[in-house]
Amino acid sequence: MNMSISIGIRKPAPALVRSADEQIAGMLAWLLVIVLTLFIAGPLVSIFVKALHARDGSFAGFSQILQVIAEPRLLAAAGNSVLLALVTTAIVVPMALAFAFAMTRSRMAGRSVFRLIGLSPLLAPSLMPAISLVYLFGNQGILKGWLGPLSIYGFPGIVMGEVFYTFPHALLILTAALSVADARLYEAAEALGASRMRRFLTVTLLNARYGMVSAATLVFAMVVTDFGVPKVIGGQTNVLALEAYKQVIGQQNFNKGAVIGLLLLLPAVISFLVERRISRRQGATMTGKSVAYAPKSNTVRDAALWMFCAFVSVFLIALAGVAIAAAFMKLWPYNLSLTLNHFDFDQLDGGGWLAFRNSMMLSALTSVAGTGLVFLTAYLVAKLPIPRMASTLIRSLALLPMAVPGMVLGLGYVLFFNAPGNPLNVLYAGMTLLVASTVSHFHTTAYLTLVASLRQIDGEIEAVARSLQRPWWHTCMKVTLPMVVPSLLNVARYLFVSSMTTVSCVIFLYTPDTVLASVAVMNMDDAGDTAAAAAMASLIFFSSLAVSLLINAAGAMIERRTQRWRSARA
């Protein structure tokens, strides 16, 4: 009898008991899922629906998608995109890794200056390096002879422009991955007789592999989805993102542009699968017993790294500096006398000084709101025991914008938020929606940067805090947040300058009252006012530089208070 009862009545599994603060974390996680769904997934679903309809509004189904994919022109563009992305990734990741290594694992002179130069492409609109390449190597370029029979218009020019465009993004991730290291690992390897090269391969690279994979997938996806550089200097080399831009802007074929936009989501799916696989194997490199690594002086190593950083810096300065110089000269390169006439924007089409003021407001709001949102997202996923389903959804939605071209995301915002039945329609044509679209567009890089930094902090810290019945926000504010201040400031600066330079994701959303400086650059360039476009681009560059220096100064003061634990353990 007793046996029949024990077989027939299954004992219920013990319920998972969560503390009150963990339940709050779970609620926040699901709230984040809703927010990310509305501002990332919602517009993309609108794109998918649009892709299933023909231009006359009739339902075409998947036949339209299959028909577009089978076009030889599209297949050639896809092949060019993949080849360009592979070549650029193969150049950028090793270059950014060596540069980040020099910044974090050497004692060479001028590291702060090199770091500022390495991140300087973030300050420039995407059209600026392309304009410089034309000035340098174009048909009337002063260095055209350096290329011999080759032309800058096409594959070589796109690769050079994409290297300039993607380098700081990879550098941010790899610097975060290398900034924290346990000195005990190096001491153990040295005691076992491992050579310098073996220590580099088995300790440094092994601990940075998560950041390397994240940087490689990010660069690959950015190149596949970028249209700015190919638009200016691509010549006859067509790519997928440029094809989507032509369909939407040139031919007003939103349906076909939506189909191509869906194809561009494939890199995001691949990146998500790779990131998930690597993150399962990623262990913490810093624990409660770790000792902060302090590089020793090495003349040969530091000299070699200094020369490498100088070579990269010359390349980066040249691509930004030529356009800036042209902005202050009457007619580059024929009349090099100085003038400020190109900055009289109110006398030209494009938005005038109102565009610049709008960009400053957009960037400030995006930096503050975006940094807070991204840190909360990364902290919930990396540090707290939130529901697995919510964690998976947040990871998927956070990585999704990485491969979504800005103009496709902007088109999705138009379709989603301008729908009459959408309660969020009140946001349409306002600054709030511009901020939301910008945060969504640049969410992935900021998210990967903070996750890479948070994963290097031992999870036992949160476990110990829970055992002491301390709420997670207490541990976050007192321990985790101070430890990731450098990465947090990098994210704030990245969001600000990216907002100043973005054009693709806001091209459909601005109104005459909310026109932006980056849009004015494109409008001036299209109108043939290249010098004025270079002047507005230079103004964006110097404004972003000034704000970045202010953030650096504030960050140095904060870090002196929050990073004392590093020197104390060294």
Image: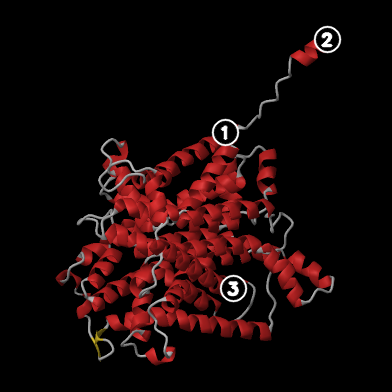
Alpha carbon separation for disc pair 1 and 2: 39 Å
Mark 3 is surrounded, within 10 Å at the Cα level, by few (under 14), some (14 to 19) or many (20 or more) other residues, namely: some
In this picture, residue 250 sits left or right of residue 394:
left
Q: Answer whether residue 557 is visible to the viewer in this image.
A: no
Q: The C terminus is located in which quarter?
A: bottom right
| Numbered disc in front, either 3 or 1 | 3
Q: Answer whether residue 219 is visible to the viewer in this image.
A: yes
Alpha carbon separation for disc pair 3 and 1: 43 Å
| Numbered disc in front, either 1 or 2 | 2
Q: Nearer the viewer, residue 421 or 125?
A: 421
Residue named by callout 3: 94
Task: Measuring from the top left, give residue 386's x and y in whole percent.
Answer: 59, 39
Residue named by callout 1: 23
Alpha carbon separation for disc pair 3 and 2: 68 Å
Q: Amino acid at mark 3?
A: Pro
Task: Measuring from the top left, give residue 118's x and y in whole percent.
Answer: 49, 74
Q: Looking at the image, do the residues carrying marks 3 and 1 touch, with CB atoms under 8 Å apart? A: no
Q: Residue at x 39, y 59 (%)?
A: 71
Q: Nearer the viewer, residue 263 or 44?
A: 263
Looking at the image, is mark 1 or mark 2 earlier in the sequence? 2
Mark 1 is surrounded, within 10 Å at the Cα level, by few (under 14), some (14 to 19) or many (20 or more) other residues, namely: some
Q: Which mark is residue 2?
A: 2
Q: Is residue 204 above or below residue 439?
A: below
Q: How many marks?
A: 3
